[in-house]
Image: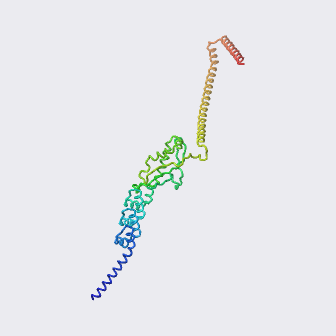
Amino acid sequence: MPTGIGLILGIFVLIVAFVLAMVVLSVIAAWIQAWGSGAPIKLYNLIGMKFLRKVPLALIVRARIQAVRAGLDVSTDQLESHYLARGNVINVVQALIAADKANIELSFQQAAAIDLAGRDILDAVATSVNPKVIDCPDPRQGITVLDAVAKDGIRLLIKARVTVRTNIEQLVGGATEETIIARVGQGIVSAVGSMASYKNVLENPDHISRKVLESGLDAQTAFEIVSIDIADVSVAGTANTANVGAQLETERAEADKKMRQAEAEGRRAMAIAAEQEMRARVQEMQAKVIEAQAQVPLAIAQAFKDGNLGVMDFYRMQNVMADTSMRESLAGGDETKKES
């Protein structure tokens, strides 16, 4: 009986030893790879990753080796936790390595948080090291130029390029490229609108970019604006004209001419109205004179009736009037001779 128990125990031990050997053999390659690369990982940690936490050994070992070889202290627990949180382990490690080489302060916790937030942390670090250029407006939105109007009423078509680099501190929760493009476009339109003449913009486009850059458009965004450059400025509607200034001056002169003509027509109409009014007043005065003259025979008749005027007096008055008429006629003839 003891022999049978001993045999059973021996078989059990052999089975356990065989299972342990198989477990160890399944992770021994990863252990040797890590140890040989200078990034050793304890054997029981490897066993726990594979059989308990179901973490891919190759991924964690490769990420650990990359970090250690680059001089970073990243533990397997951190890598496992990030993987289990559905993060991109390799991306985070490569971002940490790039940030360390570029002297950018970036911790594993911060990089993991940015990665889990859905941002590409590696691209963010790359953009922080090598700033990228954004077109304003964005051609992908179907808009190729900004339409701005100066104070003199001339429309300008403007293209700008914005150089930005990532602001790691505000990458989580900061506004994206679309906000930068919208703010820069708004700033350019506002800056052009404050210019007295379109000529000032054409002569010194850097004034526009400088004014927009000083507005602090990158506040609460995931980027820091390095520079704003005006790539192209043109006057709307004059793309095929050789001398834009001459055409604009001609159009302005034509507009002034039409305005002066309208003012002259207004003054002419007022003068005609005044003339007609004076003629009406003359007619009114003539009517009053005729009315007064009509009262004379009535007054003479009334004088005859009242006995205040005799027949001889009437004849003498007629003679005086005839003499006066003759003198006026003679005087008119003399004046006609002088004029001739």
Occupied quadrant, residue 106: bottom left
Decide which of 306, 217 is in the foreground and name it.
217
Quadrant in which residue 7 is drawn: bottom left
Q: Return the residue found at the far top.
A: 312
Colour convention? rainbow
- Quadrant of the snapshot with the C terminus: top right
Image coordinates for residue 199, horizontal then vertical, percent: 54, 41
Q: What residue sits 52% from the left and 46% below the top?
A: 148
Total number of numbered discs in the rendering: 0
Q: Position of residue 263 (x, y in %)?
A: 59, 34
Q: Where residue 2 sits: x, y (%)?
A: 27, 87
Residue 173 in sight here: no
* Residue furthest bottom in the image: 1
Q: In this view, does 331 lie above or below 12?
A: above
Residue 42 showing in the rendered view: yes
Residue 132 or 271: which is nearer the viewer? 132
For the point 43% across and 51% down, the residue is 218
| Residue occupying the far left of the picture | 2
Residue 9 in the image: above or below residue 286: below
Q: Position of residue 32 (x, y in %)?
A: 38, 71
Q: In which quarter of the image is the N terminus?
A: bottom left
Vertically, is 230 above or below 282?
below
